Image (tube, rainbow, N blue to C red):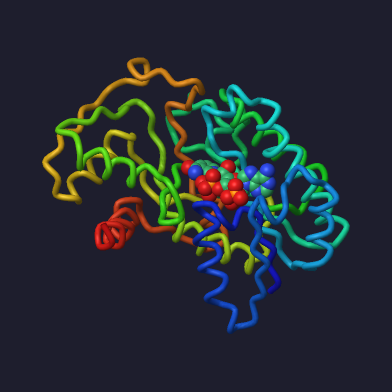
């Protein structure tokens, strides 16, 4: 399988590179690209790299992921997160490559009280969510066999993430405040990368929800991180209203695993994933 990966230098990209280069002996060929190699906004360059690498699968993990930054940079958000993927989809159609597009739980408004199904209507409340939701709609039109993998609350070793931030804060403060009224599914990029490669092998198409199983609030997530670290820091639950941010986030964005289970792929629960992440994160600190 020949794979071209956009976003190789990102949090998820780091584990996709590990996952795919570990399999090169069994015939995988990986072209791993950061924004310096190919900017998604540069249509001719995107066409060229896809033409030259002739991938069976394109994994499109690259995005402008600063959710609050997107609020004040709407044009950039749509250029990178929507127009960019359109360039990739058009080039994929020309070269006959399959495309897997990474999307987000933030395409939903958070008003559900049970896990979101892939068929639930999109209703994003942030510019980031809108740029991703629009990209999903356009890609499904341009390339009906596209695979859209929606995920949530990523953490991993490839860059900044919530557990790393909490560990840093907890090591310097006696108390930290964390919001307790947003619920979702934390997802370890190592587990996600493995599931995405399995989906490629299974020739997946359409929308698939891919997260670690179970769910929690950010406060519950932080409490688990601090407990596991053995630090004496107190974690205090607060409301989103007490900590206003530029982008509105969904209060509830748990994604149903039914679409993933249809491919007979099952994800470990988030507590188990966090334990494995912390084992290596605490070992190096
Ligand atoms: N992080 C989360 O919690 C989360 C949740 C749900 C969904 N997702 C989705 O999952 C995917 C991976 O997220 P992530 O957290 O791994 O992202 P990330 O760490 O922010 O990495 C972003 C990647 O995109 C590349 N990139 C940024 N702008 C680009 C451009 N104009 N042209 C080409 N490449 C560009 C970056 O390259 P440089 O390093 O060269 O800038 C980097 O490799 C994204 O599609 C994101 O929307 C993430």
Question: Going by the image, does 175 lie left or right of 186?
Answer: left
* Residue 174 image offset from top left, x and y in percent: 14, 33
Which residue ends up furthest to the front in the rendered image?
Answer: 36
- Residue in front for this viewpoint, 91 or 139: 91
Question: Going by the image, does 280 lie left or right of 135?
Answer: left
* Residue 11 image offset from top left, x and y in percent: 49, 52
Please say whether residue 209 is visible from this viewpoint: no
* Residue 258 image offset from top left, x and y in percent: 52, 50
Residue 50 in which image quadrant: bottom right
Image quadrant holding the N terminus, namely bottom right
Give the residue at x 44% y 34%: 114
Give the residue at x 70% y 27%: 75
Residue 93 in which image quadrant: bottom right
Image quadrant holding the C terminus, namely bottom left
Which residue ends up furthest to the bottom in the rendered image?
Answer: 25
- Residue in front for this viewpoint, 144 or 57: 57
Please say whether residue 188 is visible from this viewpoint: yes
Give the residue at x 35% y 51%: 270
């Amino acid at each position: 399988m020949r794979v071209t990966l956009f976003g190789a230098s990102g949090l998820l990209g780091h584990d996709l590179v590990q996952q795919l280069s570990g399999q090169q002996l069994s015939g995988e060929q990986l072209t791993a690209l950061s924004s310096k190699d190919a900017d998604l906004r540069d249509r001719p360059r995107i066409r060229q790299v896809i033409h030259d690498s002739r991938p069976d699968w394109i994994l499109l993990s690259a995005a402008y992921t600063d959710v609050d930054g997107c609020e004040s940079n709407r044009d950039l958000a749509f250029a990178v997160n929507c127009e960019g993927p359109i360039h990739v989809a058009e080039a994929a159609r020309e070269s006959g490559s399959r495309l897997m597009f990474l999307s987000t739980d933030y395409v939903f408004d958070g008003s559900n009280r049970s896990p979101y199904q892939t068929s639930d209507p999109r209703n994003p409340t942030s510019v980031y969510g809108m740029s991703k939701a629009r990209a999903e709609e356009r890609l499904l039109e341009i390339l009906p066999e596209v695979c859209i993998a929606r995920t949530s609350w990523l953490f991993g070793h490839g860059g900044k993430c919530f557990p790393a931030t909490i560990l840093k804060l907890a090591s310097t403060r006696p108390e930290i405040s964390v919001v307790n009224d947003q619920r979702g599914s934390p997802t370890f990029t190592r587990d996600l990368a493995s599931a995405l490669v399995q989906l490629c092998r299974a020739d997946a198409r359409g929308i698939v929800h891919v997260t670690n199983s179970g769910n929690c609030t950010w406060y519950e997530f932080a409490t688990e991180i601090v407990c596991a670290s053995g630090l004496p820091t107190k974690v205090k639950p607060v409301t989103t209203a007490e900590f206003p941010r530029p982008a509105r986030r969904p209060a509830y964005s748990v994604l149903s695993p039914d679409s993933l289970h249809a491919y007979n792929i099952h994800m470990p629960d988030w507590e188990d994933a966090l334990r494995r992440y912390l084992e290596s994160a605490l070992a190096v600190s």
